[in-house]
Amino acid sequence: MIPPARDPRMDRGVGRAVVTVSAAAIDGRVGRVLTSLAFVLAVGLAFTLPRAVAYAGLVDENLSLKGKLEQVDHTMGEVDRILSRLRLYDAQLRSLSEARGAHGPIADVGPMSGDVLEYADDLEDDALALDAPMLTSDDVLDGTTITSDDLRPADAWAADIADRVTGFVDQFDSSEAELAALMADLEALRSIHQALPAVWPSEGEISSGFGWRRDPIRRYTKFHSGLDIANDIGTPIESVADGTVVRAEYTSGYGNMVDIDHGFGIVTRYGHCSALLVAAGDHVQRGDPIALMGSTGRSTGPHVHFEIRIDGSAQDPLKYLPR
């Protein structure tokens, strides 16, 4: 049997229906995808937004901390300068306290001497009197646990450190002038000490003292302005203190003579030498050889005539020479 013929318009309607169904299915899928993406974005923002806010705060805190640490670093440069100055003062104090020969100003003190231990005990007594806390081994080894409540923000910690360092620098700057003045006074005392006679000018025996005596040549009473020390010709004569040679020449009375200016108005004289080892303008230190003993000028035998003059006035050398 032959099937009936189909109307072509019906075929076109079916095609339109198929197309319409396919578009609706696509629109549904796209909607579901967009919904899923929106959900994922929402979840992602829920997790990342607090972290982003916290990160921004952390960046601000780090920038603040960086600024404070730069300030601390700058101030630490001042601390380094202060430490250099303190090392200089320490070196000066050590040089002032160094023992020099048998007549050094300060004896050497060992690191664990009784004086040091006594000083430590005094510090502890002072702390107890002031009710000040003292750190003991129990404080270090008590095993105390640090909790989060004990911790401070980094920028607050840096600010506190900066304030403490700045306070230290300000305190040192305000007291350095006084410390420098003290060091200047100590240097002046040292200079005076170096200018005072502290060694004998030569070995020998005292043949004539300071004061009035009967002149050995002219046989009348005359004031003797120095001390005569007798020994063999050629015995070394040394400077009794640091100073500058102002005269080194022959005179009719003192023969070959050396005058040394030690500063502070102190001048020493060495007469009747057989030979001079220095010249005017030479700088000498205590114990340096300056001449050889002799009997030149108005003399009755080999000796050195030694004088100490302060502001031009003759002094008894035995008041200054070590015994």
Image (tube, helix red, strand yellow):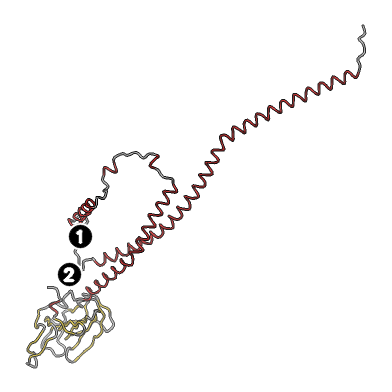
State the SS at label 1: loop
Q: Residues within 10 Å of mark 1 (few under 14, many from 20)?
A: few
**Residue 272: horizontal and vertical position, in percent?**
16, 86
Q: Earlier in the sequence, mark 1 or mark 2?
A: 2
Q: Is residue 65 left or right of residue 87?
A: right
What residue do we see at 27% from left, 71% from top?
Answer: 185
**Residue 229: horizontal and vertical position, in percent?**
12, 81
Q: Nearer the viewer, residue 189 or 166?
A: 166
Residue wearing tag 2: 103
Residue wearing tag 1: 109
Q: Is residue 69 left or right of residue 207?
A: right
Classify residue 113 by image quadrant: bottom left
Q: Residues within 10 Å of mark 2 (few under 14, many from 20)?
A: few
Q: Which amino acid is tagged 1?
A: Val
Q: Nearer the viewer, residue 117 or 55?
A: 55
Classify residue 177 by image quadrant: bottom left
Where the N terminus falls, by quadrant?
A: top right
Compared to 172, does 317 lie above or below?
A: below
Q: Which amino acid is tagged 2?
A: His
Q: Is residue 75 left or right of residue 314?
A: right
